[in-house]
Image (spheres, grey):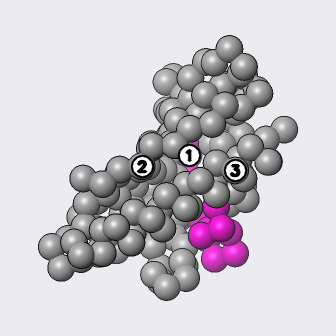
Amino acid sequence: MPSIHEEIVLDYPKESVFKQISSIDFMLAIDPNFGRSTVVLFHDDRLMRTRSTIEKIGDVEIERITIPETYTIVTQRRQPMAPFIYQISIQILLDHDKGTLLKWNDEFELDVDNKHKEEAILGILRRNDVANLQNIQRLMK
């Protein structure tokens, strides 16, 4: 399965980084694919489900699970799935001597009719991940 692994070091303790990046407002601010068109369908302490209209894709429902005990966030595409069989993103925060190491991991598998698009989709997701990490770095307080 294609995967992306990116990371940055943030000059803040992981507790404060986790609190910020767990919030819906921060998520909407860092990711240009969300924002104007995102509707929160469900939200509690750990689980959030949103629906967003993404350019060239249409409406997408996404589920986000925050796990504060391990400083982990798991985000997965729920529907529609096409062209993916699955798409998941995992962010893990670890202590670092300069603050917090944020590891950003994405993985997906395309359905058989779209396997030929794998490299293009991998490139798009990688560019989005790098942009998201740069936005996190810029917006952290």
Give the side of residue 106 with respect to residue 18, left or right.
left
Taking the view exactly as shown, the residue that stands out farthest to the right is 141
- Residue corresponding to mark 3: 134
Apparent side of residue 112 relative to residue 13 in the rendered image (left or right): left
Number of numbered discs visible in the structure rendering? 3
Picture quadrant where residue 20 is located: top right
Q: Amino acid at mark 2?
A: Ile
Using the image, tell me which numbered label, if any, was put on residue 44: 1
Q: Is residue 22 above or below residue 80?
A: above
Q: Amino acid at mark 1?
A: Asp
Closer to viewer: mark 1 or mark 3: 3
| Residue ID at (44%, 56%) | 63
**Observer able to see residue 76:** yes
Question: Which residue is at 56% across, 38% downward?
Answer: 7
Return the disc, 3 or 2, that comes first in the chain's sequence: 2
Bounds of the magenta span? Answer: 31-46
Locate residue 110: give its quadrant: bottom left
Name the residue that disc number 2 marks: 4
The residue at the far top in this view is 97
Query: Which residue sits at x=73%, y=59%?
Result: 29
